[in-house]
Image: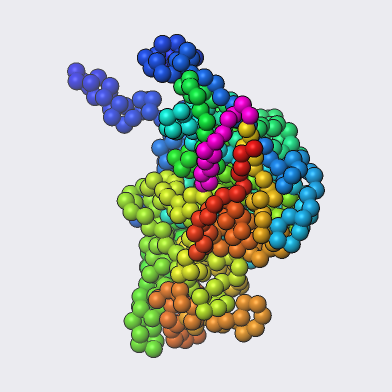
Amino acid sequence: MKHLPHTLILLPLLFGAGCGDSDTASGAWVWNLPDTVPPPRVPEDNPMSEAKVELGRFLFYDTKLSANQTQSCGSCHRQELAFTDGLAQAEGSTGEIHPRSSMSVANSGYAASLTWANPAVVRLEEQALVPMFGEDPVELGMANMEDELLRRIREDERYPDMFAEAFPKEADPISLDSITKSIASFQRALTSFNSKHDRGSSALTLSEQRGKALFFGGTNEAGVPDALECFHCHGGFLLSQAVDHDGSEFNQQTFINNGLYKLDSDGSYPDGNQGLFDITNDPADKGKFKPPSLRNIAVTAPYMHDGSIATLEEVVDHYARGGREIESGPNAGDGFDNPNKSSFLNGFEITEQEKQDLIAFLRTLTDEDLLTNPALSDPFAQ
Amino acid sequence: MKRLGALMALCAVGLGCGDDSNSSSTRQQVEISYAAVVGDQPFVCGNRYDNLGANDTSLVLSDFRFYVQNVDMKNAAGAWIPVELDENEFQTTGVALLDFEDCASMGNEDLNGLVTGSLPAGEYDGLRFTMGVPFEMNHVNHSTAPSPLNLTSLFWNWQGGYKFLRIDSGQFSETDWRMHLGSTGCVGDAMAGGVTECANGNRVTVEFASFDPSVNTVVADYEALVEGAALDQNEAADAGCMAKPADTDCGPLFANLGLPFGGTPAGTQQFFSAE
């Protein structure tokens, strides 16, 4: 008993309780992750807290973030669709059609680069500015309305207290910086690793197990080892090679051409939607896009950067052929022959049963908890 | 923090913080005037201008803003001496916004045609500056940047930077012809937390061997910028020139800015002149 007081004094210090090194006063953040998954990278200037994530949830779903107050981030990133919108191409708040399909923002804290094909955008706080203030295309349409945005937030009855709690060290916590930091924190909290697949092979049906084997390099009925080659681009805990996390020491940005188009001998894709090429101008980058995570893929149709494939069955057909042929019209050409196409896309033989097995496995990647968890839901929903 | 702030404030007004060359007694103020024109007419926000570009197009111009940095003046010995820019709502940390629009849907009513600052007392007879924002300020957190780097209509977030130059016609319709210039070909990585380099800086350096700020004005001419450009059509997907390397509408404008584009090497800029 005599020595107990020393222990009592030391323990709280060792475990960091109340040592003042946290940005936030309340709600220390705990990652709820399986031990097979590392935490995402969290910027030093934006530590996680429950208060900030909750504020970020409100902002994510708040139509005050669009100029005409018709859309929120959640309009194109709906929880029940694993934070996508079900559209081939997104529609902005003014009706402008985006050249790209809305990506799932589940697990976006693990992206080596954000959006479909942009090596420059690597931080969620910065990425949030693109839909808010971008003009080409217009999404939320808030460019030049930063003062109006802050006025709307300040006049809201709920937000001043929420910002003060989430940013206790800030004298004036309502700012563009705290808005983007809160939304980014909510996005980092959108982790999704509670699918049937995460419970191990023993949780899977025989069909799902066969599909999993084909996905991860198994031999198909035609006798070809690693016939499908899916996991080369869609491997690892994220089911995407383009991954980053708090232990990453190397840049794992990945962009590949999967043979969707071949408009000319350079391997062009439709103008204005050529992927990495639109950034680098290197003809070898035409048609290169990030291989997205396949988690929740069964609920995020339609597929590809432009939503040009409607169903998982057609996606499998596309890869089995090794590229898509478009016979007529402005996009005519055979993507199989695209000079920039990944060497993993050689096509493969697949039986109807194997196709069903593979799709059965892809359906095990759905995390029902992500789709229904009230903590991630729209707080403004009626 | 408060004490440090007070000390810095004293230094800023030149009260003996150890660097005599910075003290007010040996420095002089300079004001450099900028003007925006369209050929022989002054730029007036919302006015229509005719006979522009390769196909004599008429455009209603509604925005005309650009950032400058690296403002130097040439002294009697022929050396380029940096102008230390004042801090105000149009200038921060050596970067100034020249703002000639007061009617744009993406703008505001405030105007600015002056760059102000100080340099060591003496005679100066030349001017040089760079249009753009320096790399190290271009790719940091825009949400915490001071004015004039906090204007969301000048954010260029798809490349993690700012629009160095923005001249718009139209109000977001099919016939818009917009010119937005910023760095392109940028790459970053998650470890660095942002952009690490850009293949095309797209900053325009301008030098006038002879320039007297009490007499001369730096003139930015839209007519000279769009000379040779087909303003009645959009070859590429974007409405006008969004500075994307594949946006072939940009070719003539980059040439007139003295910037390389595609396989075309840099030429001589003709957008800016001294009058």
Question: Which quadrant holds the N terminus of chain A?
Answer: top left
Relative height, residue A259 to residue B184 (above, below): below
The residue depicted at 42 percent of the width and 29 percent of the height is B77
Give the camera-side residue of A321 and B63.
B63
In this rendering, does residue B261 appear at all?
yes
Overall secondary structure of the magenta section: loop
- The residue segment tinted magenta is B203-215
Relative height, residue B274 to residue B32 (above, below): below
The residue depicted at 38 percent of the width and 25 percent of the height is A20
Give the camera-side residue of B251 and A189.
B251
In this rendering, does residue A66 appear at all?
no
- Residue A134 picture location, percent across and down: 62, 49
The residue depicted at 31 percent of the width and 27 percent of the height is A12
Relative height, residue A255 to residue A264 (above, below): above
Give the camera-side residue of A278 and A313.
A278
- Residue B56 picture location, percent across and down: 76, 59
- Magenta stretch contains residue B233: no
Identify the image's colour scheme: rainbow, by chain, secondary structure or one colour: rainbow
| Left or right of A215, for residue A154 | right
